[in-house]
Image (spheres, rainbow, N blue to C red):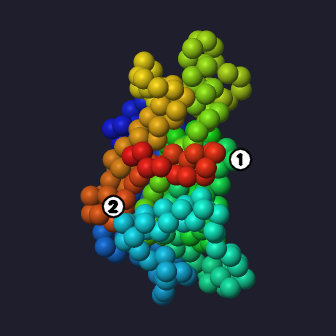
Amino acid sequence: MCQNCATTTFPTGLARRRLLRLAGVASVTATLPLVARSAFGQAPRAEPAKPQNVLTPDGAFSRLMKGNERYVEGVTRRHDFRSEREALARDQNPFAAILSCADSRIAPEYAFDSFRGDLFVVRVAGNFLNEDNLASFEYGVAVLGTPVLMVLGHGSCGAVSATIKAIKDNAPPPGHLPSLVSALTPAVRDATGKPGDLLENATKANIRLTVAQLKSATPILAKAVEQAKLRVVGGYYNLATGQVDIVA
């Protein structure tokens, strides 16, 4: 677990052992995708399913943001799955990974005007980091070779709003919702007392904290960042315009 995950309690047991096995068979080197694919029982990739997705971290980030510009301007490209179906049935090599909120108004594939096989997306209300989505991103980087990872928060986030209310009222919500409150509380605490709108500030604080957690998550992501094979950024999606602003 990374240092910044100290405020988040990850489950132990099977999930942790699964991560440890992955860490044991793979270290982030120039040949890591080949090593990790073998560890997962997958044949080495003869050629990428989508050669255009083989990008540097900076190139992948630029492509992601240009896609969002098209989305905002309403000039998105025509998406034809038929022409890509055969290649994607064999393999995948997405050029970006996204940790997105589960909010129905947020659709990363649309927001970045992407095709199938372009984005490796994990969604959870509040776009916070836990052991399962961390393992997913380790898979995306180690096995699929994804060069950029974005934490995507958004305006009017219900999960962050519920956390603010739970803290203010000192009353946990029903069911399993307290797990969301627990994960998002550090961001709300960080934003409390600062100038501006608390909901927006807490949402952006959560993005920044999660980016920091991902950058320092050992053994796979931190090493990939150190070797300039992975870029981790945070974005804030404006519901009214569709524009994604970089906040971390």
Which residue type does callout 2 highlight? Ala
Which residue type does callout 1 highlight? Ser
Image coords of residue 27 (percent x, y):
33, 63
Tell me how far mark 2 sits from mark 1, CA to CA. Answer: 32 Å
User: Looking at the image, do the residues carrying marks 2 and 1 touch, with CB atoms under 8 Å apart?
Assistant: no
Is there any visible trace of residue 203 in the rendered image?
yes
Q: Which residue is mark 2?
A: 224
Q: Residue at x 47, y 54 (%)?
A: 150
Image coords of residue 5 (percent x, y):
40, 37
Q: Residue at x 71, y 26 (%)?
A: 175
Image coords of residue 41 (percent x, y):
52, 73
Q: Is residue 124 left or right of residue 151?
A: right
Residue 76's image quarter? bottom right
In the orientation shown, which residue stands out farthest toward the left? 226
Compared to 91, does 128 lie above or below? Answer: above
Secondary-structure class at tag 1: loop
Is there any visible trace of residue 36 in the rendered image?
no
In the orientation shown, which residue stands out farthest toward the front? 73
Q: Which mark is residue 104?
A: 1
Q: Is residue 212 left or right of residue 203?
A: left
Q: Residue at x 64, y 45 (%)?
A: 240
